[in-house]
Every structure is written in C-alpha cells, then in structure tokens.
Image (cartoon, helix red, strand yellow):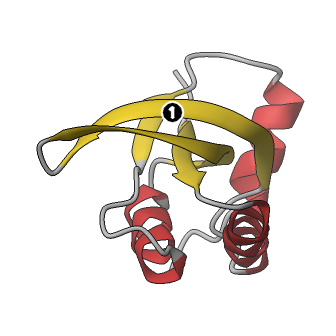
Amino acid sequence: MSDTRLVLTTAGSEAEAKKIARALVERHLAACVNIVPQISSIYRWQGKVEEAQEWLLIMKTTAQAFERVCDAVAELHSYELPECICLAIEDGSSNYLRWIEESVATTE
C-alpha cells in the first residue's frame, strides 16, 4: 500500500477549477490536479434534487496532506459544502508514486 491518495472535488466553473488546482500545486499540497470538464451532477441539496454542470478535480497528494488539501479547498471554493473525498492508491508505478510524495510538502 502506498501513502499516495487521490482526492476528488467539483467546481462550478472552469475558472474556479483552475484557481483551486493552481493554488494546490503552488502550495505543494498536490503534485498534480486533473480537471475533467463539464460533468453533469445530480444531487440532493437542502431537501431538493438539483442538477448542475461542474468540473471534476482529481488531485494527486499524500495521506499526510489530505486534511490540509480539504482546508485549502474549503478556503478557495465558492460552494457552501464542497466535496473533498479521499481514495487510497493501492499500487502504481513506483517512480510516479515517488514523484507525488516528493512533490507534496510534508509539513505546513
């Protein structure tokens, strides 16, 4: 098992997605952030079913940085309750996983 993680969030616009992605990489909280454009999301919010076009952010980071990533997403995001979920990377290219770990700051 690796210490590396994928973290997911969505944004309401391309500009917001790029702002969040750039800030996370500049702050050494993520090695890379992929932005998947214009996904359709259907969700329940405040008792109603809503539908929106969003941009999916896939962040490559470490378990140690996860809490700081979520804090930064909350700080930078326009949503009242932005998604911030973490998926463990079980295995992968050792060189790529090492690059993620080396690219993410280990302290605040």
Q: Who's the residue at 66% across and 70% down the image?
A: 20
Q: Work out whether residue 79 or residue 19 is closer to the camera in this orientation and state it.
A: 79
Position of residue 13 measured from the top left corner of the image (x, y, whole percent) = 69, 61
Q: Who's the residue at 65% across and 16% down the image?
A: 91
Q: Work out whether residue 98 or residue 52 is closer to the camera in this orientation and state it.
A: 52
Position of residue 42 measured from the top left corner of the image (x, y, whole percent) = 42, 30
**In the rendered image, the vertical position of residue 57 relative to residue 78, given as above or below:** above
Q: Work out whether residue 28 or residue 107 is closer to the camera in this orientation and state it.
A: 28
**Residue at the far right in the pictured view:** 95
Position of residue 108 measured from the top left corner of the image (x, y, whole percent) = 50, 83
- The quadrant holding residue 85 is top left
Q: Work out whether residue 81 or residue 105 is closer to the camera in this orientation and state it.
A: 81
**In the rendered image, the vertical position of residue 18 relative to residue 98, given as above or below:** below
The amino acid type found where label 1 is placed reads: Ser
**Residue at the far left in the pictured view:** 47
Local secondary structure at mark 1: strand
**In the rendered image, the vertical position of residue 14 relative to residue 40, given as above or below:** below
- Please indicate whether residue 62 sits to the left or right of residue 39 in the image: left
- What is the crowding at mark 1: few (fewer than 14 residues within 10 Å), some, or many (at least 20)? few
Q: Which residue is mark 1?
A: 41
